Each structure stands twice: as C-alpha cells, then as structure tokens.
Amino acid sequence: MKIFADTADIEAIRALAEAHLIDGVTTNPSLIAKSGAHIRDAIAEIAAMVDGPVSAEVAGTDYETMMREAEVLGKIAPNVCIKVPLTMAGLRACRTLREEGRETNVTLCFSVNQALLAAKAGATYVSPFVGRLDDINLDGTQLLRDIRQVFDAYPTLDTQILAASLRSANHVTGALLAGADAGTMPPGLIGELVKHPLTDKGLETFTADWAATGQSIL
C-alpha cells in the first residue's frame, strides 16, 4: 500500500520524504489554511520535494470554476493531482481532466455507489473517508472492503482506492487488510506506525547487554 502524507506542513513532508517513507502527499483547503501559506506556493514547494502525486484541491463547487482552478493548479508541477469533490459537477470535471491527461483524486467518498461513479468518471484515485464514517457509528474499514470487492469484480474499473481520514494505527492496518491501494494520513500517525512496546523492550535489553560487554563497534 502506498503511504501519502495528509498535510501541508513543509518541514514534516521534508522529513518523511528524506526518509523515503511516503509515496505522495494529499492536501485540502483546511490543511492549506492551517499552514498559513498561499496554495500555489505551498503546492509548488511540496511537489518539488516528492516524486509521487501531490493532491491539490479545487475550491469551486461548479464545473466552470473547478476547471479554471484546475488549470491553475495543474500548471504548478507535473506531479500535481487535481482533487475534486464527489458531486455531479466534480465528476464532470474529473472526466474532463482525465480526458486531458491529468491525474485526479475524487474526495469525500462515503459509499460504494459514490466510488463506482468516481471510477466511471475515470478517477485516478477515489478517497473513502474511514474516520468520518466511524464518527457516525458506521464501519469505515468495511466500506474499503466493499469498494475493493466491487472494483475487483469489474476489472475495467482501474481507479485506485485511497483510504483517507485514517486516524489510528488500527485504521491503517484495516486499510491494508481491506486491499486499499494507498492510505493518506497525518505525519504524526506515520511516526506512530513504527512503535511497538515489544520493540522498545527488546531494544532496551539489547542495549543493556551490549553495554555489559564493554565493546565498541567503532
């Protein structure tokens, strides 16, 4: 599964990119606002740091505005992936952008039917929101499994499942087991994935035993 950083924090992205732990970046208007940077400057800087796709989201809600904004965003860097909402206007924009050769990320997906329409519109990625479904007592991970089953049943649907709104290590594990093609998550969660109490305990033991030998590798 590809790992994308869901952030517009330049320093966090740089650290993850230098460690080769991420395959791309996703942003949205809320993350851009939180960063305090202008969207064009932020996307340009991020796109220069990572080789994979950088999702930059349109702010318009009608087709014409989305297309004008997509043209601006698409000129920032060749690895910019245009992010559109899962609405009728967004799906129309997705189809047009794909016909123009642009990668697209259809966001705010909460049902199998929505995912099917995104795939029919030619989306490169569709982003089901796992955590937000859990918030209303629905099973977000089950949605990933259901979409995977449908996409596998119809091989002509080549849209990738990008699990979004991942908030815990369990969410990430669930996305992996559900067969998601990619998962996007905050940088802090990526850092949490390396942690395990038995790893910490084992390292503590190894360190103490090595110190007792009085040896040095250097």
Image: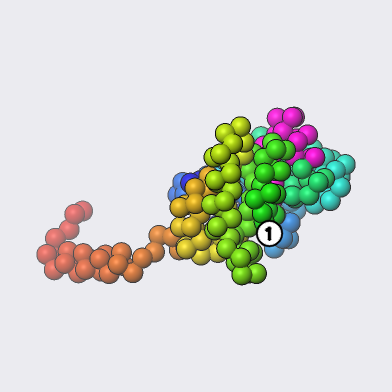
Q: Residue furthest top?
A: 100
The residue at the point 30 percent across, 64 percent down is: 199
Q: Amino acid at mark 1?
A: Leu
The image position of residue 81, as x and y in percent, is 67, 41
Left of 144 or right of it: where is 107? right
Left of 58 or right of it: where is 164? left
Left of 69 or right of it: where is 49? left
Residue under circle 1?
31
The tally of labels here is 1
The image position of residue 173, as x and y in percent, is 46, 57
The image position of residue 59, as x and y in percent, is 80, 52
The residue at the point 27 percent across, 69 percent down is: 201
Residue range highlighted in magenta: 92-107
User: Image quadrant of residue 49?
Assistant: top right
For the rendered model, the colour scheme is rainbow
User: Image quadrant of residue 76?
Assistant: top right
The image position of residue 97, as x and y in percent, is 75, 35
- Asked whether 63 falls inside the magenta stretch, the response is no
The residue at the point 70 percent across, 30 percent down is: 101
Label 1 Cα neighbours within 10 Å, binned few <14 / some 14-19 / many ≥20: some
